[in-house]
Image (cartoon, rainbow, N blue to C red):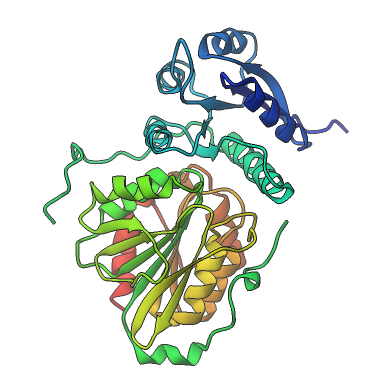
Amino acid sequence: MTSPRKIRVLIVDDSASVRQILSTILSTDSEIEVMATASDPYIAVERIKKEVPDVILLDIEMPRMDGLTFLDRIMSQHPIPVIICSSLTDSGSQSALAALEKGAVEIICKPKVGTRQFFEESSIQICDAVKSASRAGTKRRPSLPATNGIRPIQPKLTADAVIERGNSKAMIETTEKIIAVGASTGGTEALRVFLQSFPADCPGIVVVQHMPEKFTASFAERLDSICSINVREAKDGDSVLRGQALIAPGNKHLLLKRSGARYYVEVRNGPLVSRHRPSVDVLFRSAARYAGRNAVGVIMTGMGDDGARGMLEMHEAGSFNLAQDQASCVVFGMPKEAIEHGGVNKVVGLDQLAREVTLASRN
């Protein structure tokens, strides 16, 4: 029996040390093969002419041709799944988000020398990103109405490692609805479509999008500029308010909590859960315990099973849960796992998700 073909990766970065570290990390995974490395896009083009990679890891700031220009050319001439490898800077986060809008499937942070735990976690996240991108293909991103940037007038651990037990009987004290959302690969663009569809008086929304630290603040600001609702990166203790979406900070878990009739969020450190931090399972399990039947759960595009167990707990606590359908997902892994676990009430396309959530929140 022949072994399955490995995922071939082309690394494009002007830093020799970054190319070496990425090559070392990817070589530890038996499913991945570093096809080649290139110090700039011109060398990368010559390499692609000889052999087409399954995934490209692409730096943004490079000599001779920047990563965004190269990305534009790839997507227009020979679409290949691209992961942006970006630095943890304000300019880096803005460029990386622009790359997602141009068709890149995911962002990872440039690896650096750190503690053993840091290296191990980075290795997990980078290898998972490559596998996810290889399954993503090059689907066209969801279309959005033009806004011109103007705001409209209107190791597998369980979530028990992060969440303590709550008292589900206390849920009868309030009937205020909350919406809990989880997404990964392809989710940044899907969330734009989803959140833009809500009116300014919608129930409070809490979101986990798998994304590195320091990118989520820029992501929230960009969403805030095009949505009728307020969108911002969550801070510990923030109230969950109508007409507002709180985005989990990168590299932090986000939990829903409640004090009397007031919902609020807790931003917490902790281990990777379902191979992620933030983890959708952590958010969903906290929603099950502190909101119960007052919650509406939404699982969107992404690879893996993060959120599946938490969504089942939400379902068992009385929440109404929706999954994005396969046709509109960049990667159907997370919704598929949630459906197979039995935690999903309804499966709908991306363009119908906000409408169905609104209907469910009125019941």
State the quadrant of the N terminus.
top right
Task: Give the residue displayed 34% in from the left and 87% down from the top.
Answer: 174
Closer to us: 143 or 253: 253
Image quadrant where residue 158 sits: bottom right
Q: Residue visible at 51% across and 69% down?
A: 284
Give the residue drawn at x 36%, y 45%. 218
Q: Position of residue 173 (x, y in %)?
A: 37, 91
Relative to 333, is 6 above or below?
A: above
Q: How many numbered markers are drawn? A: 0
Tell which residue pokes out farthest to the left in this image: 153
**Residue 339 in view (yes/no):** no
Q: Position of residue 178 (x, y in %)?
A: 36, 72
- Is 59 situated left or right of 272 in this image? left
Q: Is residue 268 above or below residue 53?
A: below
Left/right of residue 237 with respect to residue 20 in the rendered view:
left
Report if residue 93 is visible in the image: yes
Name the residue located 50 percent from the left edge and 77 percent from the top edge.
288
Q: Which residue is most to the right? A: 1
Give the percent coordinates (x, y) of residue 113: 67, 38
* Residue that extends furthest to the front in the rendered view of this protein: 114
Q: Quadrant of the C terminus?
A: bottom left
Q: Position of residue 166 (x, y in %)?
A: 54, 84
Q: Nearer the viewer, residue 247 or 79?
A: 247
Image side of residue 58 versus residue 264, left or right = right
